[in-house]
């Protein structure tokens, strides 16, 4: 099943309700045929991570 991705670029979200915040930087190389993937940057560490859109959509927006 292909997940639709709203315009997530630039959004700030957290990993779950109490996790660290991250910013969605842009689309990344597809790692799965079933989902769109995005490059995100974890704000407290600067780490760059690839996340599927379905996870980003489920994570809460950062306050």
Image (cartoon, rainbow, N blue to C red):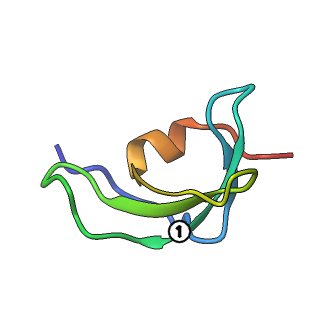
Q: Quadrant of residue 18?
A: top right
How packed mark 1 is, by other alpha carbons closer than 10 Å (few <14, some 14-19, many 20 or more), is few
Please tell me which residue is depicted at 21% across the width and 50% down the height of the picture.
2
Residue 8, image x, y percentages: 55, 63
The N terminus: image quadrant? top left
The one nearer the camera, 61 or 24, is: 24
Task: Decide which of 15, 6 is in the foreground and name it.
Answer: 15
SS at mark 1 in the image: loop
From the image, tell me which residue sits under label 1. 7
Q: Residue 38 at what x, y percent from top left?
A: 42, 62
Q: Residue at x 17, y 52 (%)?
A: 32
For residue 50, what is the image quadrant? Answer: bottom left
In the rendered image, the vertical position of residue 9 relative to residue 19, given as above or below = below
Q: Is residue 54 above or below residue 16?
A: below
In the image, is 16 to the left or to the right of 40?
A: right
Query: Residue 16's quadrant in the figure?
Result: top right
Q: Residue at x 65, y 70 (%)?
A: 10
**Furthest-right residue in view?**
63
Q: Position of residue 5 (x, y in %)?
A: 41, 59
Task: Decide which of 2, 31 is in the foreground and name it.
Answer: 31
């Amino acid at each position: 099943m292909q997940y639709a991705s709203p315009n997530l670029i630039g959004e700030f979200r957290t990993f779950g309700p109490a996790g660290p915040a991250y910013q969605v930087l842009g689309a990344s190389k597809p790692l799965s045929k079933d989902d769109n993937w995005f490059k995100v940057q974890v704000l407290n560490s600067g780490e760059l991570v690839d996340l599927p859109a379905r996870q980003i959509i489920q994570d809460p927006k950062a306050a």
